Structures are given as C-alpha cells and as structure tokens.
Amino acid sequence: MPTDLAIDVRGMTKRFGELTAVDQIDLQVRAGEICGFLGPNGSGKTTFIRMLCGLLRPDAGRGTCLGHDVIAGSEAIKRQVGYMTQRFSFYEDLSLFENLDFVARMYAVPNRRAAVCESLERLGLAERQRQLAGQLSGGWKQRLALAACMIHSPKLLLLDEPTAGVDPKARREFWEQIHQLAGQGLTFLIATHYMDEAERCHRLAYIGYGKLLAHGTVAEVVAQAKLTTWSVRGPNLLQLAEALRRMPGVKHAVAFGNTLHVSGDDAAALDRSIAAFRTEAYHWERIESGLEDVFIHLIERSPDNFAS
Amino acid sequence: MSARVFSVSRFWAIVVKEFAQMRRDRLTFAMMLGVPIMQLVLFGFAINSDPKHLPTAVLLADHGPPGRALLHAIQNSRYFDFVRQVRTEEEAHTMLARGEVQFVVNIPENFTRDLCRGDRPAILVEADATDPAATGNAMAALRALMHTALQHDLKGPLSFLAGTEDAIDLRVHARYNPEGITAYHIVPGLMGVVLTMTMVMITGLAITRERERGTMENLLSMPTRPLEVLVGKIVPYILVGYIQIALILIAARLLFHVPLMGNLLLLLAAALVFIAANLAMGITFSTVASNQLQAMQMAFFFFLPSLMLSGFMFPFRGMPAWAQALGELFPLTHFLRIVRGILLKGNGLGEVALQLWQIALFAALALTIGVKRYRRTLD
C-alpha cells in the first residue's frame, strides 16, 4: 500500500434503513492534494465525510485514513483530522478565544496559549478574540471554524461545504489559504457546490445518489464524459430550447444568460439534430464542455436509486 | 380582503398548521395526554391526607389484661398498626429515628396494679412528629379512645373509673417537632425538591442543547470519551447544587428557625450523592430526548411523581401500598428522609446509611444507562 495516500478507502457503504446513502465508494487522495468533493444535495457527501472521521460507522468498506484503519483506528484518525461541519458547530455563546481554547484543550495541544494566539493571528482574528462567536458574520464564522479545526495541526482536513453563504471576496481569500496550506503538505477533501471552487482543486470526485460517478483531474473528468457542447445565441431562446430538447442526441439545452448551451454524448446525432436550427437568426458555436455541463449530464444519466 | 380585521381563512391556516405540527411531535402530544392521566391517578388514588395504619412499636412492660385491652382498642382505631414489640427504650428510639415506626406505645411496669388502685397509671406514646400532618389525626383518635377503651374491663369494683378521663394518664411526646410547626417539615424537604427540579432539568438540557445547536457533531469529531463528556458536564452543576443547598440552609435557620440538630457535613456529603443521582437522571433523559423541549418534558414527567410520591406534599404513609412502592424508587423520597432525619432528629450516618445506599444505587444505574446510551457516533 503506497504510503503517500492520505485517504485510501474502498467499498465504503452506509445504509440508513432502506436507503443506501453511500454505495461502494472508492476514493484515493494523495498527501498534499486538494480533492474537491462534488454532488447534488443529498447525494451522500456529508455521510461519506462523517464515515472518514469516525462520526458514522460504515456498514461495509475498508481502507485507511492517514495510515490508520478507518474503522478500528477512528480514535487515532480523530486526533490527526480536522473536520469542518457544514453547519457552524462552535459555541455561539463563547468568545472566539474561548472557542479556540476549548478545542485546543480537547486535542491536548502543547503550549496551548501560544497555539491559540498564533492561530488567532494567522487567521486575522486577533482583534476580535473577545467577540462572541454568535455575533460574527458568515465569513468570519467560517474563518473561526477553519482556525478551530486546524489548531491541533491536523494532516488531513475534511471541509463540508465550507464556503456556503460566504461572499466572493472571502471565498477567494479562503481558497488562497487552502492552497498555501496544501503547499505545506496538508491534504484537503472539500465538499462544494461551486464550479469555480471545483476548478481550483487538484482532483475531483463527483458522487450522485451515493455512487461515485467521476473521479480525476478537471480535464480528466471533462474528457471522460465525452460530451459535445454547442453554444447558440439569438432570439426566442426559450422556444428554441423547447424544440431542441425533443430532438434525438440532445441531452440538455440549458440557458446561460443570453446564450443556450446544447449538449449531448453522441456528437454525430447532435450535429444532425441541430442542423435544422442553424438559420441566419442564430449564431452557433462549438465550445468546450464546462464542468457544470458534465456534472448535470452525469447526474441525469445515472439511475436515481434514492427514488421509490 | 387582506385588509379585513379578522380573516377566517388566515385564522384557519394557523389552526391547521398547529395541528399538523402537534401530530408530528409525538412526545409533546403524549405528554399533553399523559400528564393529566398521571395527575388523575396520583391525586385521585395515591394521595390521602388522613393516613391510617401507621407503623407503631410497642414497649410492653406489663402483661396484665387492661394493658392488652388498651392495645387492642388502639389497634382497632385503624390509625395504628403494631409492627413490632421492642424490649428497651433505646431500641424504640432507634426505630423512631430511622423512621421505621411512627409511634411507640409504652405500657409501663405495674400498669395493671396502679390502674386497679386508681393511681392513674401513665401510658406514654412517643410520636415522630416531623410531619405534623401525618400524626395529627392519629393523636386525636388516640385521645378519644381513652374514654372507652377499658369500658369492658372496668367492671365491678373498678366501675368507678369507667367513663372518666382519670383512669389512665395519657402522655404524648411529639418528638422532633413538639410544636407541630409545618415549616420544620417543609423547608428541609424543599432542599430535595429544589435540587431535583433544577438538576434534572439543567443537565437534561445540557446535552440536548449540543445536539440542537449542532455542536454535538463537532464534539463527537474530537477525540473524547463519553465519560469525560458526561462527568465534565455534571461537575459544574454540582457546584450550583451546593449553592442552592447553602441558600436553603441559611433561610431555614434565619427565616424559619428550623433546628439544625445533626451534622451538616454529613448532610452535605449525602447531598452529593443525591445531586449525582439527579444529574445522572438528567443526562440519561438527554440521551433519549432529541431536543431541549423534549428533555424538559421528560424532566417534568420525572419531577411530578417525585414530588407527589416522595412524602414532600402528602404523608408518605397515607398512600396505598402500590404508591409507596413506587415512591421508594425516587431518590427524592430517600433524600427527604435523610435531610429531615439529620436536621430535625439529629441522625448520624448509622441512621441514614440505608437511605443513602438506595440513592447511590439509583445514581449508578442512571449513569450506566446514560453512558451506554450516549452515542459516540451520529448513527
């Protein structure tokens, strides 16, 4: 087993009653890598992350996280992993300093006081350390959460939609930090819905209905999908989209502002279908398929095993 | 339309929504029906402010027929049940101190001889009067039956004694609370009631709050063990419990002039066990409840029968056997006996040990369930 894999799990499965929330997921993430974890709401991302850090017991599957067995070694994993929950989960009635101090005690951080102060400085929270966490805005709460889940110098960070509800500037700063930390050797698994964030990751894992649908770099994932996409501009795009959707080979016709993206996985069939619509009034252009096109395509193609 | 002062459709929308939410929250709904049923049963069947069949010890030093006839008459009043015959006064006093008997009837030596001589022999009745309500009616009945008790025996040459109050000298010692002051009984008991109410509720909320606010997920992702979390959550409230005890003791002394007969250190030590039992109960509730409201409701469901069946509000011995058996389960029942015993009777460790054990057993049981049920994962 190669030792440079921070996460190396196979066949991870979690059932809640009848529902299989996570179904046979394999995932390998190298140390120092930022792995984007994508998928629609309720696709099993949070469940998978919770299994990795010992919050949920997998029904099947095995593997290692930071070299420790994911099931037997969950105590050891907890000590070296930082987990940032989707919902802010620090104490709103404690100050920033008190929150960080609490976390530092829980992990028995050596030189606790110094570690807390350093962490406050590093994330630019020093002036606000006496403020109650509940009074912070979304962006600052997210900074606090990141500071708290890193106070024990973890080797792996599991971030569950860390930037949901955070403004673009704060998001950019956040990602700059992530890249810096990855440069220092930290490994990240980041669940997100933002395509721009996905493109900032070294590697992507896309899951839908509990199954892993795509895995690889951005370019690999786009290439694997074998999707052809056309962009069209012109009048009455809404009616055009309606008409196109009924044609063979057209998988999606999605409006992007003043343009319509038309895509399908059979390039020849798509060409034949759109030929009739290539009139003077419309400007057609073949474009690279974007991640979003690919993801929507992947999720629509996979059977919804959550339904029924 | 929307400018109307009262719109029936809007009003109806609220009604429908409330019913829909009520139906979803099964526990609250069950509580709304369960609490009145519990109150009906407790108030209707369990509570009786005229307790009869009170356990009584007999110290019989004269075996003559008049003494026996007198005892027979006392038992026939249905207020007294002779549960034991003791040989010495010390034995009788220990039983009173432990609360094993409510009365001791002492028929002295030479009772028959003195009666026949017309010397008005004394019979001594010692009562545990810590709860004046429990003994009041029995004492009244006792006085009344003195006239008639010996009517059959006082015949022939003794008939001059019949129907007079002079035949026997009834001496009643209302021990521990001779003036029958209700506050002496209530105020020390209040200590147990206040501790039960706050300790169960506060810890009940402590863990459900973590779950409700989402901080539980974070706590579970950290390398902690359940015992660390549970004990860590209990200890601060033990301190709060002691502040409550101090407040009540000061008020008992300065405002109500309750005698503090026994060893206060023993009381504080016993209180620790009692606080622990209530906190453990609260913790256990919080591992079952899914939100703070449910935890509150469970705490209330525990508190209500504790209050009613412990002997705080109504004489414990006035309740039917099933209610007494149920009451024995609650730590408050035992703590009331301890605190009243120490403060009013001056009891020492020897007298309170049995009650203390039962509280400790309850605490251990509740904490075991709590630790077992405390989920280390979110499953």
Image: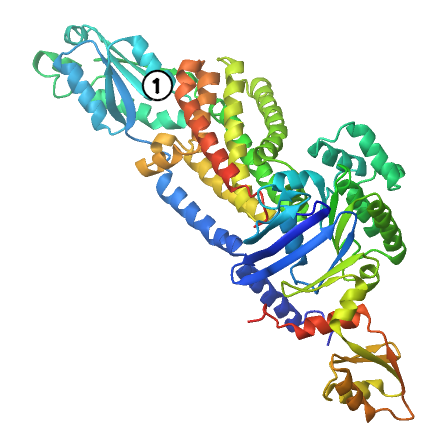
Q: Position of residue A151 (x, y in %)?
A: 77, 37
**Residue closer to the observer: B310 or A198:** A198
Residue A253 vs A105, above or below: the answer is: below
**Residue closer to the observer: B126 or B117:** B126
Res. B181 in view: no
Q: Which chain carries label 1?
A: B
Residue at the (50%, 12%) spot, across then down = B263
Residue at the (16%, 19%) spot, across then down = B69
Q: Where is residue B106 in the image (x, y as percent from the top left)?
A: 26, 13
- Relative to B277, A155 lies left or right: right
Q: Where is residue A56 in the image (x, y as percent from the top left)?
A: 59, 49
Residue assigned mark 1: B127
- Relative to A300, B152 lies left or right: left
Q: Where is residue B33 in the image (x, y as percent from the top left)?
A: 46, 54
Locate residue B144: give its quadrant. top left
Residue type of the residue flagged with mark 1: Ala
Locate residue B18: give its quadrant. bottom right
The residue lying furthest to the front in this view is: A1
Counting labels gives 1
Residue A202 vs A259, above or below: the answer is: above
- Relative to B153, A144 lies left or right: right
**Residue closer to the observer: B295 or A67:** A67
**Residue closer to the observer: B298 or B101:** B298
Residue B29 vs B112, above or below: the answer is: below
